[in-house]
Amino acid sequence: MNTTPGNVDPAELSKFAALAQSWWDPKGPSKPLHDLNPLRLNYLQRIVPLEHKQVLDVGCGGGILSESMARAGARVLGIDLAQAVLDVAELHALDAKVDVSYRAVSAEDLALERPAAFDVVTCMEMLEHVPDPAATLAALRKLVKPGGHVIVSTLNRSLKAFAVAIIGTQALGDIVNILYGHTIQGAVGVMIASALLFYMTRPSIRGCFVAMPKQIVRSQDP
């Protein structure tokens, strides 16, 4: 397995690997991901129809979003550096008879191998877990085809973002209930806020978004 030196946090990999066996339990620790996934998919489909698109899901984890995009007709490759989680993703896709490919490779290494190869690149709640998010963003830019879409969700490390994510969780849940007819229960505040307030980025990497192509939705700084 190739990795990019300096842009992998072993403690983060271990944390997610420990969740691998419960990843697909809709009532387990990954419940927020399951609850948010329909919203994520609908949001993506509004930006770009996924059918017949080559899609890369960076930091795919156990494959919740990857499988959904594949069911929507996309040809999906999910990548992650937590092998235990990828094993779960592969097994679930096999059992569910969903055609998804998975690889243990970093975005930076894949960008060297397959530049401009994907119509859509997604990266959900992953940037906050790597030491150098700017390097990952640069790789996402290299991976997408000209005219394609890079869709990123992450959270600022600011007091205002903390207030939005934690203190505002209940209010955001109420909004979801009004708009979508159901309440996301038990969701971690960070997950809810980052799902509804997409493309938020830390100030330290905002310049990378400015340098990205126009097809990347601009970041919002709460």
Image (spheres, rainbow, N blue to C red):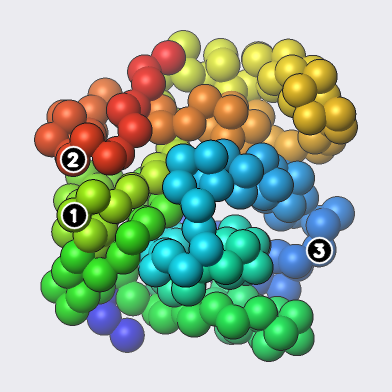
Direction from residue 112 to residue 182 in the image, left or right = right
Q: In the figure, is residue 109 to the left or right of 171?
A: left
Q: Which residue is mark 2?
A: 213
Tell me the residue at 64%/32% (across/down): 192
Q: Which residue is mark 3?
A: 25
Instruction: Tell me which amino acid carries mark 1.
Output: Pro
Q: Secondary structure at mark 1?
A: strand
The residue mark sitting in front, 1 or 3, is 1
Q: Earlier in the sequence, mark 1 or mark 2?
A: 1
Disc 1: which residue: 146
Mark 1 is surrounded, within 10 Å at the Cα level, by few (under 14), some (14 to 19) or many (20 or more) other residues, namely some
1 or 3: tag closer to the N-terminus: 3
- Crowd band around label 3 with a 10 angstrom C-alpha radius: few (<14), some (14–19), many (20+): few
Separation of marks 2 and 3 at Cα, in angstroms? 37 Å
- The image quadrant where one finds the C terminus is top left
Q: Quadrant of residue 5?
A: bottom left
Note whether 198 is above or below 28 in the view shown: above
| Secondary structure under the numbered disc 3 in the rendered image | loop
Q: Secondary structure at mark 2?
A: loop
Q: Nearer the viewer, residue 29 or 211?
A: 211
* In-image side of 151 versus 181 (left or right): left
Q: Residue at x 23, y 28 (%)?
A: 206
Alpha carbons under labels 1 and 2: distance apart: 9 Å
| Amino acid type, label 2 | Pro
As drawn, 52 above or below 198: below
Q: Looking at the image, how many numbered discs can be counted on the residues?
A: 3
**Proximity of marks 1 and 2: CB atoms separated by less than 8 Å:** yes
Q: Residue type at mark 3? A: Asp
Query: x, y (%) of residue 158?
Result: 40, 19
